[in-house]
Amino acid sequence: MPHPGTLIRDMLARGGAVPVPGCYDPLGALLIEQAGFQAAYMTGFSLASSYGKPDIGLLTMTDMVQQAARIAEVVSIPVIVDADTGYGGAANIAETVRAFEKAGIAGLHLEDQIMPKKCGAMAGKKLVPSEEMALRLRAARAGRKSSEFVIIGRTDAMTIYGLDEVIVRAKAMERAGADAIMVPSLSTPAELEAVASSVRIPVMYVAAETVRPSYTQQQLAQAGFAMALYPLSLIQTTFKAQQTMLRSMFEAGDTAQLVDGMAKFADVGRLVGVERAAAFDAQLNEPEVPTESTGS
C-alpha cells in the first residue's frame, strides 16, 4: 500500500481546492469517508472541545496521537492532523512526527505561535520569529521516516501583523522545506490571491464559516488554493443539532417529536461495523467438517 502521505501529495499536486472536512473522533471520520471525501482532518479545536476544554494547548502530544491512531485505524482515506507547535523543541518535534507517522497519519501541520498556543480564531496570539519556525520545520523533516509524510507550515500572522508578514513567513517556510503552506484568517479575494501566488508550493485554505466570508470551491481553486480545510464545520453543526435536540427534549419531557430527525439505529450500527462483526462471529462458530482419515 502507498504511504498515506502520497495520496495527500497527489491531491495537492492536482489542486482544485480539494475539500477536506475536520473531525475529532473515529465516527466523524467514518462519516466523512462515507460521504465520499478524499481525506479527513483531525483538528485541535474540535478534539479539545470534545474533551470539554478550550484549545489553548492543554492537550498533550499523547492525547493527539492516540486519537489520531484511532481515526486512522477505521478509515481508508488519508488523515491530516493538527500538531500545534510540535510540543516542544527540535527533538520533541521530531518525536512528534515519528509518533504521528507510526500512527498511520498522512501528514501534519506546525504553526508559528509561541507555547502555549491558542486557537487561531482567538485573540491574544503571539508568534515566534520566522527563524524559529524554520527550525521547527527542519526538525519535522528530520523526524519523518518517509519523505512522503507531509509537513505543512502554518502561520497565524494575518490577524496580528497583516498580509505582508503572512507572505514573508510563507516564503520563509517554503525555504525551510515545508511541503505546503496553511494560512487561516484570510477574508478578501485579494488576500486569497496574494497568498496563493506568493509561494511555489501548494497552499491550503482554512475555512471559518461563522467568522469570515465563505468562498465556493471554484472561487478557491481559481485563486490558486490546492486544498481547502473545513476544521469546524462538523463540530459546529453537531453542536447546534445536539443543543436543539436536547432543548426540545427538555421542554417536551420526551423524544416523541424528534424521532423523524434521528438516524436509524441500524444505519449507525452498519457504519461502525456491527454487521461485519456478526458475520465474523458466525464464520468462526460454524462447525468444522471432520476430515476422513485414510489410515494405512
Image (cartoon, rainbow, N blue to C red):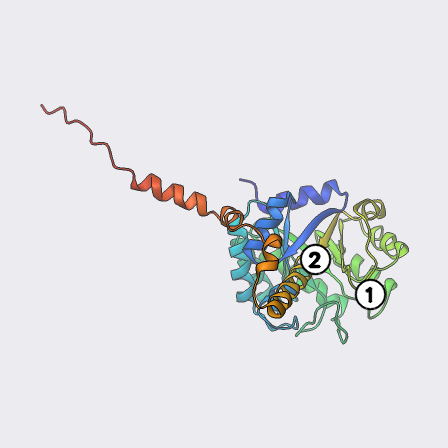
How far across and down, in percent of the image, does residue 183 sit?
Answer: 77, 59
Q: Which mark is residue 233?
A: 2
Q: Nearest the camera: 200 or 69?
A: 69
Q: Nearest the camera: 8 or 257?
A: 257
**Image vertical order of residue 61 relative to residue 23, above or below:** below
Q: Quadrant of residue 26?
A: bottom right
Q: Nearest the camera: 253 or 195?
A: 253
Instruction: Report the Cα–Cα distance between label 2 and label 1.
Output: 21 Å
How far across and down, in percent of the image, does residue 111 sit?
Answer: 70, 64
Residue 246 horizontal side relative to residue 228, left or right: left
Residue at 71 percent of width and 62 percent of height? 134
Q: Quadrant of residue 205?
A: bottom right
Q: Residues within 10 Å of mark 2 (few under 14, many from 20)?
A: some
Q: Secondary structure at mark 2?
A: helix
Q: Residues within 10 Å of mark 1 (few under 14, many from 20)?
A: some
- Residue farthest left in this picture: 296
Residue 50 horizontal side relative to residue 279, left or right: right
How far across and down, in percent of the image, does residue 175 sit?
Answer: 76, 56
How far across and down, in percent of the image, does residue 173 sit?
Answer: 75, 58
Q: Secondary structure at mark 1?
A: loop
Amino acid type for the residue under numbered disc 1? Met
Q: Quadrant of residue 177?
A: bottom right
Q: Is residue 87 visible?
A: no
Q: Earlier in the sequence, mark 2 or mark 1?
A: 1
Instruction: Give the mark toward the camera: 2 or 1.
Output: 2
Q: Which mark is residue 261?
A: none
Which residue position is annotated with label 1? Answer: 158
